[in-house]
């Protein structure tokens, strides 16, 4: 059964995708859908399960921006 999300759930996913580089957003959405389906939640998706899975997947894609006034000690190499 294909994954079906409500408008509220889709809005949540799009909000969580916003800080991710636009070139990786499609992959982010695909991985969230795959994890929801793999967890057997495809038939019982709710806003809580979508949020939980999407936040976990978001951590793999999010790269924090470098701040121009950050101390060199905290800048990534």
Image (spheres, rainbow, N blue to C red):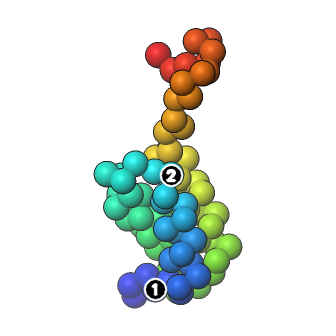
- The picture places residue 34, in percent across and down from the top left corner, at 42, 67
Q: State the mark number for residue 58.
A: none
User: Compared to 72, does 22 lie above or below?
Assistant: below
Q: Identify the image quadrant of residue 1.
A: bottom left
What residue appears at the point 50 percent right and 45 percent down from the top-left corner? Answer: 62
Residue 77: % across, % down: 47, 16
Q: Check disc 1 and report its element: helix, strand or loop.
A: loop
Residue 30, position as x, y percentages in the image: 38, 64
Q: Residue at x 34, y 61 (%)?
A: 26
Q: Of all residues shown, which one is farthest toward the front? A: 69
Number of the front mark, 2 or 1: 2
How many residues crowd around disc 1 within 10 Å: few (fewer than 14), some, or many (20 or more)? few
Q: Answer yes or no: do the residues labelled 2 and 1 have beta carbons within 8 Å?
A: no
Residue 61, above or below 33: above
Question: Against 13, is 69 above or below?
Answer: above
Name the image quarter holding residue 27: bottom left
Q: Secondary structure at mark 2?
A: loop
Closer-to-camera residue (38/59): 59
User: How many numbered marks, from 0 up?
Assistant: 2
Identify residue for label 1: 4
């Amino acid at each position: 059964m294909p994954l079906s999300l409500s408008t509220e759930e889709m809005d949540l996913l799009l909000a969580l995708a916003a800080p991710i580089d636009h070139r990786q957003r499609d992959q982010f959405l695909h991985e969230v859908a795959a994890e929801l389906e793999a967890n057997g939640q495809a038939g019982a998706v709710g806003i809580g399960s979508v949020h939980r899975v999407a936040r976990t997947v978001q951590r793999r894609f999010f790269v924090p921006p470098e701040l121009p006034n950050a101390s060199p000690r905290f800048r990534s190499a």
